[in-house]
Structure formats: C-alpha cells, structure tokens
Amino acid sequence: MTSPAAATSTTIAGAVMIEAQGVEKWYGNGYHALRGVDLTVHQGEVVVIMGPSGSGKSTFLRTFNGLEEFQHGTITVDGITLGDDLRQIDAIRREVGMVFQQFNLFPHLTVLENLTLAPIKVRQRPQHQVESQALELLERVGIHEQAHKYPGQLSGGQQQRVAIARSLCMEPRIMLFDEPTSALDPEMVQEVLEVMRELAKEGMTMVVVTHEVKFARQVASRVVLMAEGRVVEVAPPDQFFSNPQHERSKQFLGQIA
C-alpha cells in the first residue's frame, strides 16, 4: 500500500531535499515515538507538520539533523544519508538551519556576536565578511538597530527573529522550524511569521512544525498531519483544511477550529 506521503510527493516537481522512509524510533522506556514514518520534501517547498501533542511531529523534525536518533528506516538530507558517522551529521547540520521554540541564543554575546560565531568558527569565513552579512540579515528581519544589544534586552519576538537570522547566516539550503511561535506572546507571533512568509516567497525549503492554521493555509505547499507517531494525511492546504480525507484529520481540525 502506498503511503500518503509517497502518493502526494510524486506530483511535485523539484529536487528532493529530504527523503524519510520507514522511520522508527523508540525511547529507552519502550515508548514507540515514530512508527514507520515516510515523508519527501522537495526544493522550495514549505511543508507544515501539524498534530496533537505527543504525535511525534517535533521528534520527527529533529531526526532530520541528527538531534534525535532513530532505530530503523532511512533519512537522506540534501543527498547525505544520516547514519552513525558524525561527519555525515556535521555535513548535514552545515546545510540545515534550525529554529527552536526557545530561542537558544547565547546570553553573554551580543546579537551580532550570536550571528557571527558559527560562520567564523565552522565555515572559517573572514570576520568582516560575516559581520557585513549578519547586519544585512538583521535588516532583513527588521531588527538592525538591535545588533549590539544582548538577548536579554530584547522582546521574545525580537529574540526569535535573531534566532532565524542566526540560522540564515550559515547560508542553509533547508530551514527547520520547531513550533517557533509557541513560546511567544500573541502580539509577537505575527512578526515572526512574517519573516517566515518572506523566506517562503524567496524559495527557501522549509519544514515547519506549528499550530498556526492561518500560516499553514497561506504559505504551506503541503500540510502533514501526524498522530500517534504516524503520518495520517498529506495534502495541499486547501484540501487539508476544507476537505480532509481521514477521520483523524477531521477530528483534529474540529478541535483547533
């Protein structure tokens, strides 16, 4: 039987950026977190993953850059297959940006220093070049004037925009977002989503775990519903929100509407 993810992916053009097949994960206590999950993400797509708490969506996202181990199945990211080789994981992390719920900024470094640290240390790029790019990125996300402040001096929305700019400073080919607005006050959510909308318009390949229905409707190429560690449904947003095919999808949408 063809999985929902496999059935949908064949209709989408573009190079394959992420290919997950039969991914299984157990935690040490025997909890089966991911149960044969398949997903294909193509270049330039914005794939939004939704689902109830405990459905495995954040766990699945974190397998893409080796933050979560998995026991069975395969994951290939930008042509590199994840395995036990740390060099493979490092290579993937150089190409994949990640934005978390909590901003994970270094509190003792200025905003500018937060952006420039990794490109200088990891990519070994000249400091003046990286600083110039970092300032351009801060302008792009609307907080150029905050460059020399410390994270603790910024609002939550500003800190999350710094986190996005920091990921972009590594010039990633793929961006992963793990519920990037869930820790923000409601009035700060839109400023972060607007930055993500602009990234989507520019063609960035993105996988986003979120409950932001409006964002998913407007920006997603496809919406994925996960429940109990499985992919239940994959569909374009118009179909997913107006005419879901699975009872579990209808139940989930009924709860968040």
Image: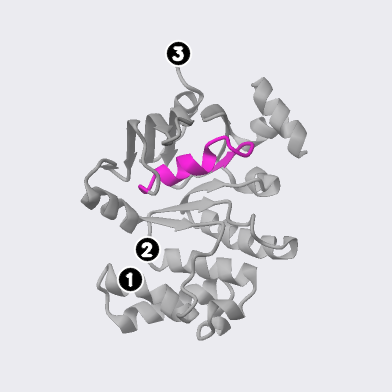
Distance from the alpha carbon under mark 3 to that under mark 2: 38 Å
Looking at marks 3 and 1 on the same chain, the residue that comes earlier in the sequence is marked by: 3
Q: Is residue 105 above or below residue 27?
A: below
Q: Which mark is residue 119?
A: 1
Pointer 3 local density, CA inside 10 Å: few below 14, some 14–19, many at least 20? few
Q: Secondary structure at mark 1?
A: helix
Measure how far apart labels 2 and 1 are at the Cα level. Answer: 9 Å
Q: Quadrant of the N terminus?
A: top left
Sequence order check: which comes first, mark 3 or mark 2?
3
Residue 251 at what x, y percent from top left? 72, 27
| Dot 3 amino acid type | Met
Could you give the CA–CA distance between mark 3 and mark 1, rounded to whole angstroms?
A: 45 Å
148 lies above or below 84: below
Horizontal placement of 171 versus 105: left or right? left
Which residue lies under the disc numbered 2?
Answer: 171
What are the residue bounds of the magenta stretch? 48-66
Q: Residues within 10 Å of mark 2 (few under 14, many from 20)?
A: some
Residue tagged by mark 3? 1
x then y, percent, for residue 18:
38, 40
The answer to whether residue 225 is seen in the rendering is yes
